[in-house]
Image (tube, rainbow, N blue to C red):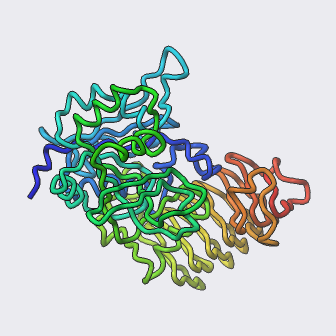
Amino acid sequence: MIDRGRTLVLLLAGGVGSRLNVLVQPRAKPAVPFAGVYRIIDFALSNVMNSGLGQVGVLTQYKPLSLMRHIGTGAVWDFTGRTRGVKILPPRTGFQDSDWYQGTADAVRQNIDFIRANPSRELLLLSGDHIYQMDFDDMIRCHREKAAQITIGMMVVPKSEIHQFGAGITNAEGRIVEWEEKPREAKTDLASMGIYVFDTEYLLNLLAQDREMLDFGMHLVPRAVERDRVFAYPFHGYWRDVGTIQAYWEANMDVLRDDAGISPEAWGIRPNPRPCANMADRPPVRFLRGNHAERSLISAGCVIEGTVVNSVLSPGVHVGKGAMVRDSILFDDCHIEAGARVELAILDKRIRVGQGAVVGTGDKGVVNCQHPTHLYTGITLVGKDAEVPAGASIGRNCIVSPWKKAADFPADGKVGDGETV
């Protein structure tokens, strides 16, 4: 049993997450809802809790209010007590633009006073926007056994995807002997998960030596690999970076599959029910006469009169009589009126789809004109509090921006494939 009280956790939760498009216009990326009742950050927080660690600093930056409200006192994850706690750490803004975090290493550097105020042997650095289950206790144990100065969580990925990650080549004992950040050509299939264990004093010395080191993967790790003891911690299990619309949609769909290897409830992932649209006070799901539901996750407070297939519904969604929702993700309190159809779409909170309207129809091959790298597989996005007028028709790879109303749509109600309202 390791001494867990000697490990301090820093959770990076300040990224813009721009590839999630309208889903991050009203909130930080780690605060985006996931699998009905969770937020993305719940996975990192729950993994910390389940590993027996209790001192956490959450580094925020971009639109932090919903994230701060969600975390609250940390009591949901047992981060309260004399030796346990969670602290929100915003950037030290006020004098110049450079006060904002310039990278992962810079974010840690700006919070050295917090690290010093919470003495530790190791510092566990996590990202707040990944979906996975991991025992950090075992990772810290391996770090100590190998007398490592840095240990990096790594997993095998297809070589075609290695350009998205930091990549490491290891020797027989697991020591990283070569490192490339997002290489164009794959020399290895071993990718960084963005999970690090550092010897605390070693890290503080590195950050003090060179203030030009702004990012761990790009600057600090390559230099450390050349001269210090940097080891890989092999991970075998489900892990996803849900930083794109496609990856986010696929991870939600994985929850519906028995063979996908993801099970938030079995993993002990804990949501915070209070900020989530009063989730704790929602009544049970109501399935009314004429409904049909299959292979779907349907949360408390939903009312299903129509058809729901292969979809994830957050609390309070109403699917009207004769309406259909297929291959879609609906956030809290969406209302799909009678005869409407939603297919291969992601709807943010409180969307109203008018009677007989269609969201998601047409040619999946027509990419979004404004954001071709965000929407290219047919998924259509509808932003928070938008209203789709009755009888409207919205194509594939479309975007309806948050807070749009019926008057903002074309007169004939048709939004072509790849268009944005």
Q: Residue furthest right?
A: 412
Asked if residue 377 is positioned above or below residue 277 in the image, the reply reads below
Name the residue located 44 percent from the left edge and 32 percent from the top edge.
213
Q: How many marks?
A: 0
- Give left or right: position of 348 versus 134: right
**In this view of the protein, which residue sits in the foreground, 401 or 50?**
50
Q: Which quadrant would the N terminus be assigned to in this image? A: bottom left
**Does any portion of residue 69 appear in the rendered image?**
no
Task: Residue 193: give x, y in percent of width and height.
Answer: 41, 57
**Does any portion of residue 294 appear in the rendered image?**
yes
The answer to which image quadrant residue 46 occupies is bottom left
Task: Residue 308: give x, y in percent of width and height.
Answer: 59, 78
Task: Residue 317: give x, y in percent of width and height.
Answer: 55, 65
Name the residue located 40 percent from the left edge and 49 percent from the top edge.
127
Task: Residue 396: give x, y in percent of width and height.
Answer: 76, 66
Q: Residue furthest top?
A: 95
**In this view of the protein, which residue sits in the foreground, 356 or 116?**
116
**In this view of the protein, which residue sits in the foreground, 181 or 371?**
181
Name the residue located 55 percent from the left edge and 21 percent from the top edge.
97
- Give left or right: position of 79 versus 252: left
